[in-house]
Amino acid sequence: MLNAILFGILLGIISGLTPGIHNNTFAALILAYMPILSNYFSPFELGIVIFTNAIVHSFLDIIPSALIGVPEEDTAIAVLPAHEMVLDGKGFAALSLSAFSSLFSFLISIPIFVVFLSNLNYFYGKIYSFTPYFLIFASAFVILSERAEIFEGSLAAWRKRFYAFLVFIVSGFLGFVAFKNQSLAEINLASSIFIPLLTGLFAAPVLIVSFKTNRIPKQDLEVKIPSIYGVLPGSLSGALVSLFPAVSSGVATVMASAAIKDRENFISALSSANTANALLCFAVLFAVGKVRSGAASVFSKIVNNVDVQAILLSGIFASLASTLLVLTIGIISIRLLEKIRLDYLSFTILAFLFFIVYSLTGIFGLAVFLSAIPIGLSTLFLKIRRISCMGCLMLPLLLRFVFNF
C-alpha cells in the first residue's frame, strides 16, 4: 500500500503545481489506463492513489494560486489576498498558513468522517430536498456580507452590495452559458469548463494588474500558524457543502470566507474548506453511495470493498507529507520568483494561460475566458470582494435546482 500512497502523492504534486491539471484529470486517466495499472496495483490500491492524490492536491494548489495568481475552482477566491501577501513580502507566511490550515482541517474532519459513516444514511433524503434553500441562503450571504469601510457610511455599504449583486448576476449568466454548452469545451480527457471560466475571472485580472510591478519584494521566511477562527469555519463549511448534490467545493470556500475580512483568516478558511471537502466527499460516498467529486466518482467505479481505516491512515500520511512539501517547494519557488521580473513573468503566464485555455477547451473555452476577464477586473475597479464572481458557480446551480434549467 505504501507504493500506492507514494504514487498518489507524486500525482498530487504534479496536479497541484500544474495550471490546468486537476486531481480529477488523473482520476480519469487512472480509469482509462486501469488495464495497464492493474499489473502493478490492486483495485483498492488504485483507490488509495486516487484518494491521496485528491488530498495532496488540496494542499499544493495554493502555491500557483498565491505566487503566480493562477487559480483552480478550490483556490479561486484566495488569489488576491494571497497575492497581496506576496507583494508585502509575506508570501511564505501565506503558504504556511494554508499548509497548516489544511493539515488541521484534515484532522478535525476525521471525527466528522466517522459521524457521516454512522449517521448520514438516516437523514440524507432531507438534505437533498434542502439543497435549493441552501443555495439561496449562500447566494444572499455572499452579496449581503459585502461591507464598506467604517468612514464610508451605510450608504456606501449598500452601494457595494448592489455592485456585488451585479457582478454575481453577470458572472452567473456567464457560468450558466458556459455550463449549458460545456460539451463544446470538452475536446480531450483533460478538458474542463472550469479552466477558462475561473482563469478568466480570477487569474487573468491579477496578472494584468501585476504588469505595473517590476519585482516582488524580498520574502521573509516566516512560518505562520493559523487561527482557529479561520480553520474551524473552513472545516465546517467544507463538511456542510460535501453533503449537497452538485454543490462544488468552490461554494464551500464562499461560505467559509464570505464574512472574513482579515486576509490571513481568509486564506486559512479557504484552505481548510478545500481539504475538508476533499476528504468528506469520500465519506459521503462510503456512507450513502453518492458522488460529490470527480475523484470520488472514479473511486466508486474501481473499488468494491473499502477499508476505511486504511483510507484514513493513508490520508494522515499524505497530509503530513503535503505540509512539508508546501513549505519546501514554497521556499524554492519564492527564491526563484525573487530573481525574476514580475511584469515579464505575469505577461508570460498570461500568454501561457491563453495557450492552455485554447489547447484544452478550444474556441469556445477561449470565448468564455475572454468574456470572464472584464468581469473579474470590474471587482478591482469597484473595490468589492471577488467572492461575488463565484456567482458563476452558484447561480447555475440555483437555476438548475429551482427552475430545472
Image (cartoon, rainbow, N blue to C red):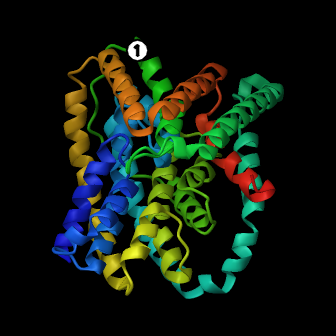
Residue at screen point 53% across, 66% down:
292
Q: Is residue 300 left or right of residue 112?
A: left
Q: Residues within 10 Å of mark 1 (few under 14, many from 20)?
A: some
Name the residue at 35% across, 38% down.
64
Vertical position of residue 62 compared to residue 400: above or below: above
- The residue singled out by tag 1 in the image is 211
Q: Is residue 284 above or below residue 156?
A: below
The percent position of residue 118, horizontal first and vertical second, equals: 55, 87
Residue at x-position 38% and y-position 45%: 62
Residue 381: x, y in percent? Answer: 62, 19
- Residue 137 sits above or below residue 163 on the image: below
Residue 319 at least partly seen: no
Comparing 35 with 394, the one in front is 35
Is 300 situated left or right of 243 in this image?
left
- Judged from this view, the residue extending furthest toward the right is 155
* Residue 165 % position (x, y): 75, 35
Seen at 75% across and 70% down, the residue is: 129
**113 on left or right of 350:** right
Closer to the camera, 264 or 349?
349
Kind of residue at disc 1:
Phe
Judge from the rendering whether residue 210 lies leftward or rightward of residue 252; answer left or right.
left
Q: Is residue 361 above or below residue 253?
A: above
Is label 1 in a helix, a strand or a loop? helix
Residue 400 placed where, x, y %? 72, 55
Residue 28, quarter of the rendered image: bottom left
Q: Quadrant of residue 367?
A: top right
Q: Quadrant of the N terminus?
A: bottom left
Q: Is residue 355 shown to the viewer in this render?
A: yes
Question: In this figure, what is the number of numbered marks?
Answer: 1
